[in-house]
Amino acid sequence: MKSPLLSTLPALRALANPHRVQIMDWLLDPERHFPPQRDGDLVEDGVCVGFITDKVGLSQPTVTSHMKTLEQAGLVSSKKIKNWVFYKADQRALEQIASTFSTASQPH
């Protein structure tokens, strides 16, 4: 039987990078951290990769790489609108990680 902690390993690896942790923090409350967008709703559609790039201060290819890592780990979803990609945090994935740790810390 696979340990629940092992199933969270890709997400934990993705969150081992401080830039990705910062981006996730911003995506969890996009209206607080980003200005309104011309295309796409911050909450419904996610945040445009251009806004994330500007805020984090890294190159666009680097940010795209970070976002792909977060997406592959199941922490964000992406949506293409026109020529841009928008990213949205997956709150359930983060709750599952938290739940795994709270379950693991309980006496058996």
Image (cartoon, grey):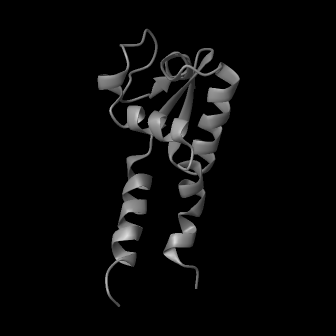
Quadrant in which the C terminus is drawn: bottom left
Q: Hey, which quadrant is residue 6 in on the image? A: bottom right
How far across and how far down the image is residue 55, in percent?
A: 48, 19
Q: Position of residue 20 (x, y in %)?
A: 53, 39
Q: Residue at x 46, y 25 (%)?
A: 47
Q: In terms of depth relative to the viewer, which is nearer, 89 or 102?
A: 102
The quarter of the rendered structure image containing the N terminus is bottom right
Q: Is residue 7 left or right of residue 92?
A: right
Percent from the top left, x then y, of residue 89?
Answer: 44, 40
Camera-side residue of 44 and 64: 64
Q: In this rendered view, identify the residue nearer to me: 59 or 73.
A: 59
Left/right placement of residue 84 relative to residue 91 reads right
Residue visible at 60% across and 22% down in the picture:
58
Please state the horizontal and vertical placement of residue 29, each as a whole percent of the image: 32, 32
Question: Which residue is outermost to the top?
Answer: 38
Instruction: Give the residue displayed 58% in from the left and 49% down from the top.
Output: 14
- Tell me: residue 78, above or below residue 98: above
In the displayed structure, does residue 36 sit left or right of residue 3? left
What number of labels is visible?
0
Q: Residue at x 37, y 61 (%)?
A: 98
- The extreme bottom residue here reads 108
- Rendered view: 67 above or below 56: below
Q: Is residue 13 visible?
A: yes
Residue 77 in sight in this render: no
